Amino acid sequence: MTPWKLPLVVAAIAVPIVFAFYLGGPGVGLAMGALAAAAIVVVAVRQRPRGAIGPREREPGRRILIVLAAPLEDPEAVERVAEAVKKGDLTEVMLLSPVRIGFLDRWASDVEGARRDAQRRSVISVAALAAAGVEAEARLGDEDLVQAVEDQLGSFPASEVILVGAAGEGEGDTAAAADELRARLRVGFSWLVTGPSDR
C-alpha cells in the first residue's frame, strides 16, 4: 500500500464515527463504530492473496496438472490434451476436479452430491485419457479453481497447468479463473474450452 493511502483509510473509518458521536450521542456513535468494524471484517475476509502461484520447489521432469471445470470427454479435447501430454519428457499427469458446492448445499452442510459430481468428472476424464494412452491420477480440490490450483501445486510441483472448461457451463467463472491463473501462475498455462457438456 502506498504511504498516502493509509491516512485516507484511517480518516474514512474515524470521521464517520466521530460525527456520529457528535451528532447522535454515544448510542449512535457506538452503532457507527460497530458498523465500521463489521465493514472492515467483511472487506478483510473477502480479500484474496494476489501473489504469484507456483510450486515450492522445481523438480526434474515434466508434470502436468489438468484442472477439470468440466469433464474431459469431448474426443477433440481429449486428443489435444493427449498431444500436449505426449510432447517431451513427461514424468506425471494429475487431474484436479474442484468440488463445486451449491449455495443451499453449503448452508445445509450437504457436500456429498458435489463430491459425487467431482468424482464423476474425474472418472470420465481419467477413462478418456486412458483410452488415448495417457495415464493420470485424480484428486478432488477446493471449489474455487484458483485456490484449488494453488493448494495442489504445494504437493504436486507441476511445470504446466491446463484448465478444461465447457462452453456455456459456468463460463464466466471459468473465464475469470483463467484470467487470474494466467496472471499469477509461474508455470506454463493453457485454457482448453470444450463443447457443451451435460456434466
Image (tube, rainbow, N blue to C red):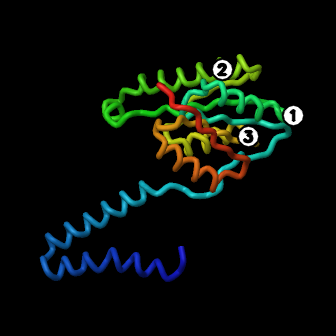
Residue 12, horizontal then vertical, whole percent: 34, 76
Q: Are marks 2 and 1 in contact (CB under 8 Å)?
A: no
Judged from the image, the secondary structure of the residue bearing numbered disc 3 is loop
Residue underneath mark 1: 89
Judged from the image, the secondary structure of the residue bearing numbered disc 2 is helix
Q: CA distance from mark 2 to mark 1?
A: 21 Å
Q: CA distance from mark 2 to mark 3?
A: 24 Å
Counting residues from the N terminus, which is met first, the one under dot 2 or under dot 1? Answer: 1
**Residue drawn at (64%, 52%) of the image:** 182
Counting residues from the N terminus, which is met first, the one under dot 2 or under dot 3? Answer: 2
The label number, if any, that marks residue 69 in the structure image: none
Residue 51, horizontal then vertical, whole percent: 61, 58
Instruction: Mark 3: give few (<14), some (14-19) or many (20+) Cα within 10 Å.
Output: many
Pick the front one: 185 or 41: 185
**Residue drawn at (22%, 69%) of the image:** 32
Task: Give the number of the mark in front: 2 or 1.
Answer: 2
Counting residues from the N terminus, which is met first, the one under dot 1 or under dot 3? Answer: 1
Task: Give the number of the mark in front: 1 or 3.
Answer: 1
Residue underneath mark 2: 128
Residue underneath mark 3: 157
Amino acid type, mark 2: Ala
Pick the front one: 196 or 127: 196
Residue 86, horizontal then vertical, whole percent: 81, 30
Amino acid type, mark 3: Pro
Task: Give the number of the mark in front: 2 or 3.
Answer: 2
Amino acid type, mark 1: Asp
Q: CA distance from mark 1 to mark 3?
A: 15 Å
